[in-house]
Amino acid sequence: MSSETAPVTAAILVIGDEILSGRTKDRNIGTIADFLTALGIDLREVRIVPDEEPAIVEAVNALRARHSYLFTTGGIGPTHDDITADSVARAFGVGIDIDERARAMLLERHRPEDLNPARLRMARIPFGADLIPNPVSKAPGFHIGNVFVMAGVPSIMQAMLDAVGPKLQTGVRMLSETVEAGGLPEGAFAGDLATIAAEHGAVSIGSYPSMTESGFRNRIVVRGRDGEAVASARTAIEALVERLKR
Amino acid sequence: MSSETAPVTAAILVIGDEILSGRTKDRNIGTIADFLTALGIDLREVRIVPDEEPAIVEAVNALRARHSYLFTTGGIGPTHDDITADSVARAFGVGIDIDERARAMLLERHRPEDLNPARLRMARIPFGADLIPNPVSKAPGFHIGNVFVMAGVPSIMQAMLDAVGPKLQTGVRMLSETVEAGGLPEGAFAGDLATIAAEHGAVSIGSYPSMTESGFRNRIVVRGRDGEAVASARTAIEALVERLKR
């Protein structure tokens, strides 16, 4: 099954000083990568930037121009260092103010007298954006143009991603097959694998070593959208691995 | 203790289709972030790009121009998809060929008759680069200009990072103090925290929620290079938290 349509591509922008300092280890990139791959959307680039408006604006504008979708994580809470919404509004050149739909969502969690100016910051939404519901703590994300702005807390990000899924144009699912080369060294099969890769231009072939207690373990992965092409490359690689293991 | 010198900054470029597909979850970014923070070097940006020369060249040139140092991970093995060395040579506009020092390192692991063309790819080093030793599997990384090119396998990357450390100009160590706000909601302290942040311009203050089984847990982090300024902000934040908890 092949598609005549252009691939659907995406980028991720992670926003947060705490990731760059090492204090917090990002887990959202891997989650979003798996999510997009399952939908047939090609994740093409990721950037991590600090909580600084010029850096966020530049990255949002570079990435939204290049890809079908941009997903951002982080910086949409109530504290002074949460500047993602204002930065995205700046990137789009639109205004931003308290959004009544967002205020109503916050009122599902907070009493009216508790909706102080800080909490109301979480209802600041760029003009023209749609909201992304947050079943965990109510403060919404938003969707403007091809940009989806989500929370940084992994459980909330995951819930927002699930809400966003049905809105996305999906691509032809990328098929992936793995051939276990085991302890066979990359250097022993790399030459023949390059030949197979050249002969199977419809797929991409990668070799991924990992370290185990007994040394390297290598896996060869074939990826492509044409099932027959993937199967053909896989057969060739399996034959290569069998031959070298003998 | 303050410094009159400009901060030492860094970027990371992670190279690899397998990270973008979600198949492999990156662990190197967090390791390098911790390493740089301990040396007083500010990690300012991270990018992840696929195994494609134009994407690598563009990112290398953008990031090396902006920062004191660029660290790359991935794409220096023997297989056809390992194109980092050639891409970095292209980015610098220099030639690349088998490096005799690198070949000698490979001969510590492989017999001469096993140094096939694929394995010799791992000795291809851009002209003018210094080598970064690899105590795990011998194939070296390299250092050209302000760019350090390292392996993607975490244990090898870590060993290369350790080798690189003494070569780096270090900065004034960033001091970090954490105030536990516990279950105190961000929305309850965000307004006062913004005032404290405005009054303590020499430090950066961040609020970081995480989800626990009993709900949100918030930590407030003060970061800065001036110990007195960090201590002063910390004292103000502790007083705020104590007041609100009463």
Image (cartoon, coloured by chain):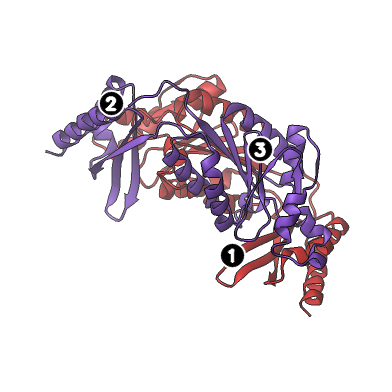
Chain colours: A red, B purple
Q: Chain of mark 3?
A: A
The mark found on residue A68 in the picture is 3
Residue neighbourhood size for the residue with mark 2, other residues' Cα within 10 Å, grouped as few (<14), some (14–19), many (≥20): some
- Is residue A116 visible in the rendered structure shown here? no
**What residue lies at 17% left-to-right and 32% top-to-bottom?**
B239
**Do tags 1 and 3 sit on the same chain?**
yes
**What residue lies at 73% left-to-right and 37% top-to-bottom?**
B128
Give the alpha-carbon distance from disc 1 to disc 2, as whole Å. Answer: 44 Å
Dividing the picture into quadrants, the one containing residue A103 is top left
Q: Chain of mark 1?
A: A
The mark found on residue B229 in the picture is 2
- Name the side, left or right, on which A163 lies relative to A204: left
Dividing the picture into quadrants, the one containing residue B3 is top left
Rendered position, B217 above or below B6 = below
Q: Nearer the viewer, residue B145 or A171?
A: B145
Can you give x and y, in whole percent of width and height, for residue A198 in the image? Answer: 86, 56
Rendered position, A143 above or below B99 = above
Q: Amino acid at mark 3?
A: Ser
Point out the image quarter for the C terminus of chain A: bottom right
Can you give x and y, in whole percent of width and height, for residue B106 in the image? Answer: 72, 59
Q: Which residue is mark 1?
A: A211
Give the alpha-carbon distance from disc 3 to disc 2, as whole Å. Answer: 45 Å
Can you give x and y, in whole percent of width and height, for residue A131 in the image? Answer: 47, 35
